[in-house]
């Protein structure tokens, strides 16, 4: 099996696009949040992922402030 064929699938990690969809924001905004250290990516090989728990925590805080 070539390294390019390896796919990591875990419910604990999100792609930047998945995080953007969950937060209701654009993908470039997610990248901005990473550059401002509001989100902390996990590096696996050359790919970066976000922890679902961290994204959901931001989402919950966002909901609480809008109520």
Image (spheres, rainbow, N blue to C red):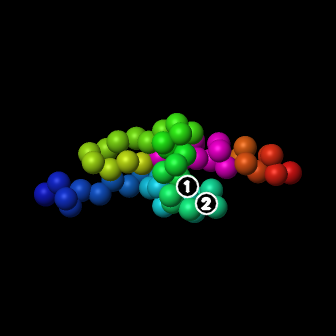
| Residue farthest to the left, as pictured | 1
Q: Residue at x 58, y 47 (%)?
A: 55
Name the secondary structure under disc 2: loop
In the rendered structure, the answer to whether residue 25 lies left or right of residue 35 reads right
Residue 19: % across, % down:
54, 55
Q: Quadrant of residue 2?
A: bottom left
In the rendered structure, the answer to whether residue 40 lies left or right of residue 60 reads left
Q: Residue at x 82, y 51 (%)?
A: 66
Q: How crowded is mark 2: few (under 14 residues within 10 Å), some or many (20 or more)?
A: few
Q: Name the residue under label 1.
A: 29
Is residue 53 found inside the magenta-colored segment of the image?
A: yes
Residue 67: % across, % down:
86, 51
Q: Name the residue under label 2.
A: 25
In the rendered structure, the answer to whether residue 53 lies left or right of residue 4 reads right
Which stretch is magenta?
50-59
Is residue 12 visible to the viewer in this orientation of the structure?
Answer: no
Residue 18: % across, % down:
51, 60
Query: In the depicted view, which residue is nearer to us: 56 or 23?
Result: 23
- The answer to the question of whether label 1 and label 2 lie on touching residues, with beta carbons closer than 8 A, is yes
């Amino acid at each position: 099996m070539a390294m390019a064929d390896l796919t990591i699938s875990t419910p604990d990690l999100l792609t930047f696009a998945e995080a953007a969809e969950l937060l209701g924001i654009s993908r470039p905004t997610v990248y901005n949040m990473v550059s401002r250290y509001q989100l902390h990516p996990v590096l696996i090989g050359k790919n970066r992922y976000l922890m679902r728990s961290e994204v959901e925590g931001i989402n919950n805080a966002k909901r609480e402030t809008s109520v």
